Image (cartoon, rainbow, N blue to C red):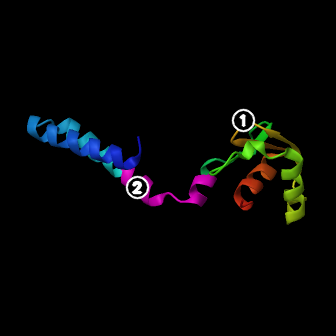
Amino acid sequence: MNVAELQIEISELYKQANIDQDRELINELNIISQVLSNNKSNSSSTDFKNKFTYNNTDQGPYFVYIEGKNGNIGNIHPLKLGKYLFENNKGNLKIKSIKRKGKNRVGVEFETANEANLFSKEVQF
C-alpha cells in the first residue's frame, strides 16, 4: 500500500470516527496523517540513501545491493561490473567481491563500512 492509498483509507476512517464521535481515534488519525505528510515531503533520493548506511560500529560483511529498474541486472557478469567500476575511477574503492544475488540484483562487498557508504552515496548507474 502506498502513501496515497493510506491517506485515502485514513480519510475514510476519519469520516467514520466523526460520525461515531470517537475523539481518541480522530487524534490518532491526525497524528498518523501528519507523519505521512512529513515523510512524503522530506523524502528524496539523498535522504533515502542516508537512511541505509553502515555505522562505524557495524560489523561486516558490508554489502551494497544494486537492483535494476529495467531488465535483469543479475545477468551482468560480475567481472564486467568490476571492470566498469574500475574504468570509471571507482577503482580506489576496496571491493572484496561482486556476486549475483538473483535475477535482478548484484551484491558488492566492501572491506569497510566507510567504503560501502561512499559507494552507495556517490556511484550513479
Is any part of residue 120 visible from this angle? yes
Residue under the point 72% across and 54% down: 120
Residue under the point 72% across and 35% down: 102
SS of the residue at dot 2?
helix
Q: Are marks 2 and 1 in contact (CB under 8 Å)?
A: no
Name the spot of residue 89 as percent of width and height, x first: 87, 65
Query: What whole-number distance in Å separates the C-alpha atoms at marks 2 and 1?
Result: 34 Å
Can you identify the residue that label 2 sits on? 38
Q: Which residues are magenta?
A: 35-50
Direction from residue 53 to residue 63 in the image, left or right: right
Residue under the point 81% across and 52% down: 115
Q: Quadrant of the N terminus?
A: top left
Give the crowd class for mark 2: few <14, some 14-19, many >=20 residues within 10 Å. few
Residue under the point 89% across and 48% down: 79
Is any part of residue 55 visible from this angle? no
Amino acid residing under circle 2: Asn
Name the spot of residue 24 as percent of width and height, x first: 21, 36
Name the spot of residue 38 as percent of width and height, x first: 40, 55
Can you identify the residue that label 1 sits on? 102
Give the crowd class for mark 1: few <14, some 14-19, many >=20 residues within 10 Å. few
18 is higher (above) or lower (below) than 94: above
Name the spot of residue 122 as percent of width and height, x first: 73, 61
SS of the residue at dot 1?
loop
Does residue 34 belong to the magenta stretch?
no
